Image (cartoon, rainbow, N blue to C red):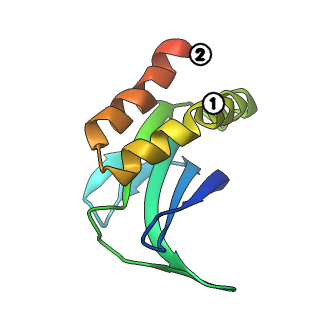
Amino acid sequence: MKIKDWYKQKENGLWMKIEIIYSLGGMNYFSGRNEPRGYSVAFTTFEKDKNFERYIPMSNENFRIFAKEVKRKSKKVERELVEYIDSIANELFKMYEKMNKEEIFNKIREFNRIYKQ
């Protein structure tokens, strides 16, 4: 379930999107893994026109980072994560444009150190 998203246009006409997603977790039969319940931050590059967004499936530019495990959906964690991403969104977009995944992962992991539940 999508919680919030941020958009920015790239210089080549494509768009970047950062989005916070809540997942119930459980068995993912596509990947064969049991996934935790919680919040993730997804990074996506896509083409956009008036009414549609066109994504490139299985692209290396599209990835998701698990940000916070929870026992149940939490408005407090949602609010804190939205505030955190809001405060660093421009920095994340710059890192994403350079495809600096390691720095992005570290920034998202920092959320757990700052906001302990």
Q: Is 50 rendered above or below residue 97?
A: below
Q: For mark 2, give the secondary structure.
A: loop
**Residue beneath disc 1:** 87
Seen from the viewer's position, the closer of residues 76 and 6 is 6
Seen from the viewer's position, the closer of residues 39 and 52 is 52
Q: Residue at x 47, y 72 (%)?
A: 14
Name the kind of residue labelled 1 in the image.
Ser
Seen from the viewer's position, the closer of residues 27 and 88 is 88
Q: Residue 73: x, y in percent?
A: 66, 38
From the image, which quarter does the C terminus lie in? top right
Question: Can see residue 36?
Answer: no
The image's mark for residue 46 is: none
Horizontal placement of 43 versus 2: left or right? Answer: left
Labels 2 and 1: the sequence-earlier one:
1
Question: Can see residue 77?
Answer: yes
The image's mark for residue 117 is: 2
Q: For mark 1, give the secondary structure.
A: helix
Q: Residue 79: x, y in percent?
A: 72, 32
Query: Label 1 crowding class (10 Å Cα cut-off): few <14, some 14-19, many 20+?
Result: few
